[in-house]
Image (cartoon, rainbow, N blue to C red):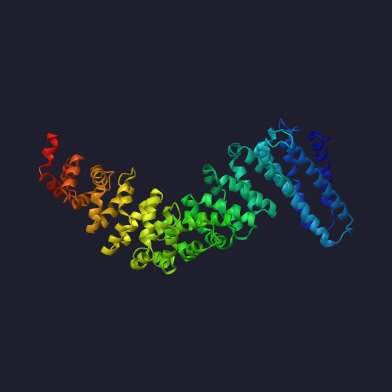
Amino acid sequence: MVGGGERLRIARLLLPEAVEKAKAAKGFPGRWSVIISKLAHLPPCLSDLSSHPCFGRNVLCGELLRSACEILEEIINLAENCGTGEASVGKLRMQSELDAVAGKMELILRDFGLLIRTGVLAESSPPSSPSNLGEILSRIQIGDSEAKDRAFDGLLEAMKEDPAAVVEALSRGSVSALVQQLTAPSPRLREKAASAVCFLAETATCHRTLVAEGVVPPLIRLAESASLACREKAAVALERLSVEADTARAIVSHGGLRPLMGICRGGASASCAASAGALRNISAIAELRRALSEEGAVKLAVELLKSGEAEQRTKSLAAEWLRNLTSGAENFKRAAAAEGAAVVLLGLLEVPSPEEPPVGALRNLAGFVSSEEMLSLGLIPRLAHVLRAGSLEARAAAASAVCKFCTRREARRSAGACGLLSPLVAMLEGKVAWAREAAAQALLCLMSCSQNVEAVKKDSRSVPHLVQLLDPGPQNTAKKYAVPCLLLLCGSKKCRRVMVSYGAIGYLKKLSDADAPGSKSLLQRLQSQGLESFFLRK
């Protein structure tokens, strides 16, 4: 086996011959001039390699020297063909071969430079060793497409076996090389590069480096026109990267909305869900919602929610971006209502464990769809189901929706009859302040109906829970609703006794000092009965 030292000796013998014959070649002076100028850069590269202490033992170094010798021999042969001025091949073919060899020289000089800069000369593991991540990462940057293809196989295998080690081994230069391969001429290289970038995008610490190296534009191009597998990887990477607000802005500014929406309309299930996730992330940024709306995001979300083919995750993400879009400007809400979003969202509340996005989106449409129509379509029983079986976020959104839609006495009476009061009372005991506040507000809304007041009085949990919400602490945002609720209940002597026994007077004194609305009136009602002294004697 020929060693690195012998290959270096051969290269140094061939180099002056190649230069001499290139200068003597007849015809194509411009092309030969380019080749001669590139040959002039080779001696410093050979010197840098030979002066390294690990020269002769490094596999990549030996491979590059072998390629350099082959290129020099090719230049000599081409020059000999042109030496007499009567080429043995056609003129067009000779031009093509000269251009090709100039390209090879450009590549070999670049590879020598990369090999020296990356520091991989210090590595001397065998070429088949998958453990040498430094060499694998260097091979992605050095050599022809077949060599890079094999290097990517090694990298992807290493990512499966020890992902943490791969992330640790990556330098900024290596990330840049991966990003560059997203635009490689070879479809196989593009697909494998997309897989590697998709893996890195899963690690939050890599996000900033990927974006800084310009990963967003090539990912968008892949999402728009690559193979199905490549489009999926690109969509997943964009979803993961778009959790960062600056990256989401970059996706929009580079025209990424249309490709993502195109995948949602006709992509495979995995790529469709990933694209929907990216659009969800983008919709979370208020300043980008107009761009989404202009591209038809509202209509697309409703189409996905109606679709019988879209998987559940895609529908959930579409509901989430629809909720985000309808959380602000009225024109978005009006557009969603016009597309029939409310009826579709109602159907999504029937699942065993409802989540917040469809409930929140439906709540946002209040005032832009007919409350009477929604109630006739079964809104209240569905909200009752959410309040009993939904996630905490979904229950809070449902409580808010009660206030939005139950604006008439009949609707409030119907809500009480359908069992909304009991789960709302239960929510008052929760540990999350915003959920307690939503429940207390909804309870107050429904208690404007006398039948509901009587039902709340009969619930033994209601007064103790409401009294606890009188806590004057700043983190307790539900006290402004607890006071009027207790005022509605204090007509009952039993309720007043329970209020006092649970410490309502102490809370109310502090709230009165802070001029909390209704607190002085409630305090007077409780003190006027002489209940305070009664319980103190006890």
Q: Nearer the viewer, residue 522 or 513?
A: 522
**Residue at 52% of width from left, 63% of height from top?**
307
Name which quarter of the figure residue 372 lies in: bottom left
Farthest residue in the top direction? 53
**Could you tell me if residue 252 is visible in this image?**
yes
Labels in figure, total: 0
Whether residue 169 is situated above or below residue 336 in the rendered picture: above
Name which quarter of the figure residue 338 lies in: bottom left
Q: Position of residue 347 (x, y in %)?
A: 44, 61
Say whether residue 157 is left or right of residue 25. Answer: left
Q: Position of residue 215 (x, y in %)?
A: 57, 51
**Could you tell me if residue 408 is visible in this image?**
no
Say whether residue 329 is left or right of residue 538. Answer: right
**Residue at 74% of width from left, 52% of height from top?**
103
Whether residue 370 is situated above or below residue 420 in the rendered picture: below
**Residue at 10% of width from left, 45% of height from top?**
529
**Residue at 68% of width from left, 51% of height from top?**
189
Farthest residue in the bottom direction? 338
Whether residue 261 is situated above or below residue 5 in the rendered picture: below
Q: Quadrant of the N terminus?
A: top right
Q: Quadrant of the C terminus?
A: top left
Q: Position of residue 291 (x, y in %)?
A: 46, 62
